[in-house]
Every structure is written in C-alpha cells, then in structure tokens.
C-alpha cells in the first residue's frame, strides 16, 4: 500500500525547488532576452513567470491532499491534485497561446529583424541546464510516488525544456544571419507547450472521471488475490484512480460449503495481501461469492 504522506512530502519538496529555480529562470530569461535582443527568450521568460504562480497553487494543493479522511471526505482529499492539475494544464495551454501570439506579432511587424546577441545565447544555455535539472528531479519523483500533480509538473518541465531548446536553436540560427528564426522559435515554443498542456489536461480529466488503473496494476492485483488457495475465481474487479493510487472493489469466488467465518477470513486475507503487495492500491473492498463447482 502506497504511503500518501511520503508522496506529499516529496511533492512539496520538488514543488518548492521548482518555484525557487523558476524565479531564477525568469530573471535570467528576461534580463538576457532584453539585453541580448531575443524575442524567443523573452517569450520563454513569460512562460517561467506563469510557472511561478502555477507552482505556488500546486504546492497548496499538495499540502491539502495530504489531509486525512474525515466525515465529509471519507476517501480523503487526494482528488484535489487532479483538480489543480486540470486548471494547471489550462494555464499551460494559455501560456503557449500567448507566446505564439507574441511570436506571430513579431513576424508580421514591418521592418528589419534585429538578431539576438551573445548575451541571449548564454542566457538560453543557462536556462536549459537549470530546466533540464528540474525535469530530471521531478520525473524521478513522479515515477516514485505516481502523484498526478508531479506527473503534471514533470510534463510542464519537459515542455519548458523543449521550449528553451527551441529558443536556443532560434538564437543560434539567428546569429548566422537569419534573425527571422528568433520569432519563429517562439511559434515552435508555443505549439509544443500547447500540445503538452492538452496531454496533462487529458490525464487529469481521466482521474476525475474515475478511469481504471493501468493493466499492469490490475494484473498484479489479480495475481496477489489468487495466491490465497481458497480463492477459486475472481468474479468482478473494478479499480478507480485517485491522486497517486487507486481504490479497488472486487468479488471473489470461494467454495459454497464454507462457513461465514471462513469466508470472512479469506476476504480479509485477500484484502491485506493486496494492500501490502501492490503499492498503487489505497484501499480494497472484497466481497465473497459461493462457487457452484
């Protein structure tokens, strides 16, 4: 059974790190973009600025999701992660649209393009290194905790890595006498951010719609349940994801001539086996049915 408190602690630690480094990134991108005359880097700075607000909201949601179940919320508060991730994905898409609009306006403005300078190039390289580090840390945390919030954060960091890579390429190409590639890089950045935002939106929406756990988790649950030799068959198995885990409802088939007490002990054993051996499972509800054969 996965430990939600541990997931929350890891998530909060990574989110705070993301906020601090995003402030640093915004300062680097805006200063080097303005001084180095890079529209792509300034656009990327807008992205980092919006990230700071988004990560702050994400941090609050993680803290709230760690609250224990109560009378009004018997299943806990983990779904707040998916709700915030949903709005976070919309913010990602909106940011991409703004960046694309800025790049489009720059391209349609009359007059010669002023290419970026060496300062912009240094700023883009520094930003890429910082964002790459953030993505690696967040990806590992998301893989360890299976938190929907950290998965959304990891996706956001990855889109930022690609966005900054696009800005860097635009700056490099512009220095070779093709300054139009700098605003073109903004359009590439916006497109990638929008696509990634919709991916996060889909993942968050699926959790809110109680999508089933992945097939590997379902197969593991079945395998663990059948380790009890008294379980002759699994008649029904339903799962629904929530936060970094899932809830399970299952019906098992046992010999029809056993006592109620024996049936209860079998169900309890299956319940304990699954919660102890399948880390994604938050809670299991087991019902026993009599088998005719």
Image (tube, rainbow, N blue to C red):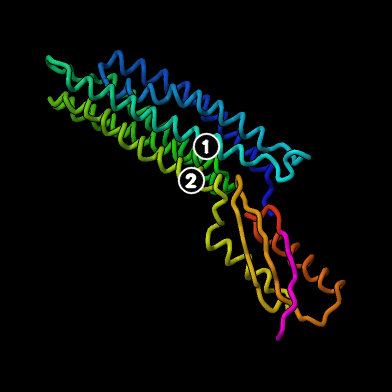
Q: Which mark is residue 85?
A: 1
Residue 289 part of the magenta-drawn span: yes
Q: Is residue 4 above or below residue 174?
A: below
How far apart are labels 1 and 2 at the CA level? 9 Å
Within 10 Å of the Cα at label 1, are there few (<14), some (14-19), or many (20+) other Cα atoms?
many
Q: Is residue 212 above or below residue 108?
A: below
Residue 154 part of the magenta-drawn span: no
Instruction: Report whether 187 appears left or right of 79.
Output: left
Instruction: State the SS at label 1.
Output: helix
Instruction: State the SS at label 2.
Output: helix
Tell me the residue that label 2 is attached to: 203
Provide residue 124's location: percent of width, then percent of height.
33, 27
Instruction: Report whether 60 appears left or right of 136.
Output: right
Q: Nearer the viewer, residue 250 or 20?
A: 250
Instruction: Report whether 34 appears left or right of 225.
Output: left
Magenta-colored span: 285-293
User: Quadrant of residue 68 in the image?
Assistant: top right
Q: Residue at x 21, y 20 (%)?
A: 106
Q: Residue at x 45, y 44 (%)?
A: 202
Provide residue 154's location: percent of width, then percent of height.
48, 40
Q: Nearer the viewer, residue 285 or 112?
A: 285
Q: Nearer the viewer, residue 52 or 70?
A: 70
Q: Is residue 8 above or below residue 290?
A: above
Within 10 Å of the Cα at label 2, are there few (<14), some (14-19), or many (20+) other Cα atoms?
some
Q: Which mark is residue 111?
A: none
Asked if marks 1 and 2 touch (Cβ < 8 Å), the reply is: yes
Provide residue 126's location: percent of width, then percent of height.
37, 27
Of callouts 1 and 2, the N-terminal one: 1
Task: Name the magenta segment's main secondary structure.
Answer: strand
């Amino acid at each position: 059974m996965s430990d939600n408190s541990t997931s929350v602690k890891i998530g909060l630690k990574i989110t705070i790190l993301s906020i601090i480094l995003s402030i640093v990134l915004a300062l680097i991108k805006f200063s080097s973009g303005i001084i180095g005359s890079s529209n792509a880097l300034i656009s990327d700075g807008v992205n980092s600025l919006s990230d700071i607000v988004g990560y702050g909201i994400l941090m609050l949601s993680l803290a709230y999701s760690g609250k224990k179940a109560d009378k009004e919320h018997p299943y806990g508060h983990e779904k707040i992660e998916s709700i915030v991730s949903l709005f976070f994905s919309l913010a990602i898409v909106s940011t991409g649209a703004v960046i694309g609009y800025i790049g489009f306006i720059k391209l349609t403005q009359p007059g010669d393009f002023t290419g970026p300078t060496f300062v912009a190039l240094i700023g883009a390289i520094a930003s890429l290194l910082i964002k790459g580090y953030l993505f690696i840390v967040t990806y590992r945390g998301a893989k360890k905790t299976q938190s929907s919030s950290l998965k959304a954060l990891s996706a956001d960091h990855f889109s930022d890595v690609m966005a900054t890579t696009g800005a860097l390429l635009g700056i490099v190409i512009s220095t070779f006498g093709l300054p139009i590639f700098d605003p073109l890089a903004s359009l590439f950045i916006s497109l990638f951010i929008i696509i990634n935002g919709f991916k996060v939106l889909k993942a968050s929406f699926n959790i809110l719609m109680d999508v089933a756990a992945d097939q590997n988790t379902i197969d593991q649950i079945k395998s663990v349940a059948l380790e009890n030799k008294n379980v002759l068959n699994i008649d029904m198995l339903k799962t629904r994801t929530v936060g970094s885990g899932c809830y399970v409802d299952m019906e098992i088939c046992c010999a029809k001539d056993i006592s109620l007490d024996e049936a209860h002990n079998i169900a309890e054993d299956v319940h304990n086996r699954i919660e102890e051996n399948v880390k994604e499972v938050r809670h299991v509800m087991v019902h026993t049915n009599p088998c005719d054969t």
